[in-house]
Image (cartoon, rainbow, N blue to C red):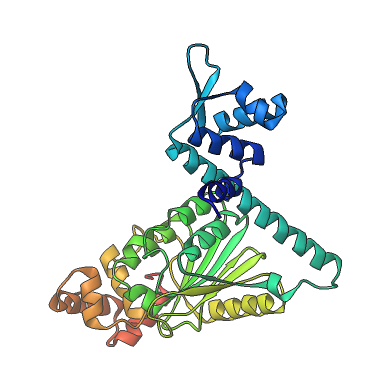
Amino acid sequence: MSLPDELGAQLLRLGLGETAARIYRRMLENAPVTAGELAWREDDAETVHLALKELADAGLAVSSGVDGAEFVPANPGEALAALTTRRQAELHDARLAVQTAYRAFRRAHSGMPHAQDLLEVVTGDAILPRLQHLATLVRRQVRRLDSPPYFTGGRRNLLEEEQLRRGITYRCVYSGASLGDPGYLTANILPCLRAGEQARLLPELPVKLTLFDDRAATIALTIREADRNQSIVIVRPCSLFSALEGLFETTWAAALPLDQRGRTAEQPIRPIERELLILLAAGRKDDEIAAELGVSRRTLFRYLETLMDRAGVSSRFQLGVFAAHHGWL
């Protein structure tokens, strides 16, 4: 294939018409050219006029000369970038249209949804945008079994706080590993508690799970099964979705309640003492608790002794039971 023919094929792939592609190649070979010269070769003045307009609109040709009757190629850098972007958008729209048509076909020719419509595996860089999209569509409630590793890096969840203020309900069960993740308690959990999240705590969770209203659920591996997140499964309403709802409710019922509003002013303990109790209830080791609170082991033991004296107990287990029953958590 000659170079001009190859160039023409590439221009067609970018969305130019056949006549516009031919005229652009002729401009490159023998510019400037006039509409009259091109019409003599193409044998159709109207077709040439439309092709020149197409090239001008695409940024590939400009008029020149005293009366603007001549045309020369323009610098294609920005024009080709715009053409490529437009073509990519058109291909994306076409792909979505085909997928939508296929799903409509499946619904019309089957008594139940196709399995591929019920389960979807999302991997890599596509995970975080999908999770954020699902979260923005929530209208009533989010139910979550929370465990690291985190797709967001454990940053503050501003979207949840805003949705809580709008009246959307969040019920979350945190694992002990959640509270062991450096800074996650203070940067993420406590701000959500103060915004109105209903939270409970268990030392371990069977799975990472989020239920978005009654429309979708996401499942991922916990820190015990994966060093880092590589994939999630999105589940649409089906028997598996109902089973996941049951798993959440059973786990919720078995978990230790945390203070729903993150109140500290009305409690007979200081905020740092409350964080200590939450970490203790999560089963964290002394060194991990001290590091999370930013205190020494000696200061940590002093806090524990003060709390046990105040509660009138002699063991950490008794302190945990007392804290749960007296609203210290």
Left or right: where 36 falls relative to 223: right
Outermost residue to the top? 67
Q: Does residue 59 appear in this view?
A: no
Residue at 81% x, 64% y is: 105
Q: Position of residue 137 (x, y in %)?
A: 60, 55
Q: Position of residue 296 (x, y in %)?
A: 14, 74
Residue at 52% x, 16% y is: 68
Report the number of numbered marks: 0
Most foreground residue, 190 or 34 = 34
Q: Position of residue 293 (x, y in %)?
A: 23, 69
The quarter of the picture where the N terminus appears is bottom right
Q: Kindly indicate the quadrant of the structure image that contains residue 185.
A: bottom left
Q: Does residue 288 appear in this view?
A: yes
The quarter of the picture where the C terminus appears is bottom left
Q: Kindly indicate the quadrant of the structure image that contains residue 107.
A: bottom right
Left or right: where 175 falls relative to 294: right
Q: Position of residue 186 (x, y in %)?
A: 32, 63
Left or right: where 323 falls relative to 296: right
Q: Kindly indicate the quadrant of the structure image that contains residue 289.
A: bottom left
Residue at 29% x, 66% y is: 183
Image: 110 above or below 26? below
Most foreground residue, 210 or 170 = 210
Image: 113 above or below 188? below
Most foreground residue, 133 or 110 = 110
Most foreground residue, 77 or 28 = 28
